[in-house]
Image (cartoon, helix red, strand yellow):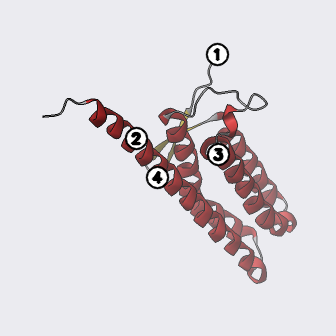
């Protein structure tokens, strides 16, 4: 039975998020709750969250854009469809939308002298934006291939 994407709304914008994205968000929430409950762990969390988010980005990149999900040892998909590309982009989009909020929450629990650690999120943001641009480029390339195929099939005038 295929899994379904869940709808998440951030700042008025809706996103479809796949199961792995939901697990990631749940983990992020737990990290933030720990930081709020025990402020002494906020600095290590400020370093751990970007690592976690980059790990998700890297895995999503390999699975979708590098077709790792087609391997039998992975999801065993027959192809990476527009739907897979769109869901991957949406899952990255929700992370991009949440990044400023994550930084603000962590900043509230970090001592002033350690807030420089939040700059690590800027690199994560750049990585996620680049990944989304590559997904968009893949959409365009697929559409261009289909257009060329259809034009070839048209009778000459």
**Separation of marks 4 and 2 at Cα, in angstroms:** 12 Å
Looking at the image, residue 126 lies above or below residue 13: below
The part of the image, by quadrant, that contains residue 74 is top right
Q: Does 60 sit left or right of 35 as displayed?
A: left
Mark 3: give few (<14), some (14-19) or many (20+) Cα within 10 Å: few
Say whether marks 2 and 3 touch (CB < 8 Å).
no
Of labels 2 and 3, earlier in sequence is 3
Dot 2 lies on which element? helix
Which secondary structure lies at badge 4? helix
Q: Position of residue 116 (x, y in %)?
A: 72, 79
Position of residue 96 measured from the top left corner of the image (x, y, whole percent):
56, 57
Q: In whole angstroms, how far apart are the C-alphas of marks 1 and 4?
A: 30 Å
Residue 145, numbered circle: 2
Per the rendering, the mark at residue 82 is none
Left/right of residue 152 with respect to residue 78 in the rendered view: left
Residue under label 3: 66
Q: In this orientation, which residue lies closer to the viewer: 146 or 115?
A: 146
Q: Nearer the viewer, residue 148 or 84?
A: 148
Q: Position of residue 87 (x, y in %)?
A: 54, 39
Q: Residues within 10 Å of mark 4 (few under 14, many from 20)?
A: few
Q: Which residue is mark 4?
A: 137
């Amino acid at each position: 039975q295929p899994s379904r994407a869940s709808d998440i709304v951030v700042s008025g914008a809706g996103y479809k998020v796949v199961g792995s994205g939901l697990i990631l968000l749940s983990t992020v929430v737990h990290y933030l709750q720990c930081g709020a409950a025990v402020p002494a762990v906020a600095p290590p969390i400020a370093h751990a969250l970007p690592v976690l988010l980059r790990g998700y980005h890297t895995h999503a990149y390999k699975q979708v854009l590098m077709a790792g999900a087609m391997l039998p040892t992975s999801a065993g998909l027959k192809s990476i469809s527009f739907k897979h590309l769109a869901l991957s982009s949406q899952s990255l989009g929700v992370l991009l939308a949440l990044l400023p909020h994550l930084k603000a929450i962590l900043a509230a629990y970090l001592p002033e002298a350690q807030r420089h650690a939040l700059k690590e999120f800027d690199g994560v943001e750049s990585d996620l934006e680049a990944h989304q641009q590559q997904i968009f480029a893949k959409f365009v390339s697929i559409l261009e291939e289909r257009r060329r195929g259809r034009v070839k099939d048209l009778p000459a005038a």
